Image: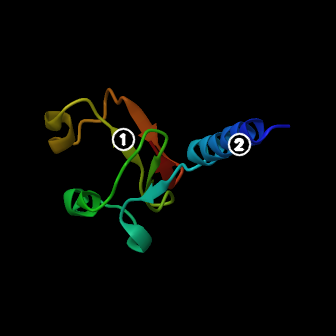
Amino acid sequence: MTMVTKMVMVLVFMAASTGVKWVGAQVHHVVGGDRGWDPSFDVASWSSGRIFRVGDKICFPYSAAQEGIVEVKSKDEYESCDVGNPIRMYTVGLDGI
């Protein structure tokens, strides 16, 4: 093998290794940290110091025995607690989007 061939093989291996690590570099962001999430939590402040990438998971921990989370369609539905036509209901206690 020539030196050029060896160099190309090394570069291909390095590129493939980097690609594998990048794909597997999914980050789980836990909203609220150890305290967990609740509607009064300042999500804007929490998120301002973070970098989010495609493939990351944002987790919302809460007590499933005491609470559930409902994704609603509008601010009006949220403010009036109208859960009659939800987009999705979360009931696990550590739901992620």
Residue 5's tag is none
Tell me which residue sits at (23%, 42%) in the image. Answer: 81
Mark 1 or 2: the one toward you? 2
Q: Mark 1 sits on what residue?
A: 70
Q: Is residue 89 visible?
A: yes
Q: Is residue 71 left or right of residue 59?
A: left
Q: Is residue 48 left or right of residue 25?
A: left
Outermost residue toward the bottom? 34
Location of residue 60 in the rendering, given as x and y in whole percent from the top left corner: 42, 55
The type of residue carrying mark 2 is Met
Q: Is residue 61 visible?
A: no
Tell me which residue sits at (49%, 49%) in the image. Answer: 95
Distance between the alpha carbons at the discs numbered 1 and 2: 55 Å
- Local secondary structure at mark 1: strand
92 is higher (above) or lower (below) than 12: below
Tell me which residue sits at (35%, 30%) in the image. Answer: 86
Outermost residue toward the front? 2
Name the one closer to the observer, 92 or 26: 26
State the image quarter where residue 74 is shown. Answer: top left
The type of residue carrying mark 1 is Val
Q: Is residue 47 left or right of residue 5?
A: left
Task: Assign the C terminus to one quadrant of the image.
Answer: top left
Residue 7's tag is 2
- Local secondary structure at mark 2: helix
Name the one closer to the observer, 25 or 66: 25
Task: Assign the N terminus to one quadrant of the image.
Answer: top right
Q: Is residue 4 left or right of residue 34?
A: right
Does label 1 or label 2 sit earlier along the sequence? 2
State the image quarter where residue 67 is shown. Answer: bottom left
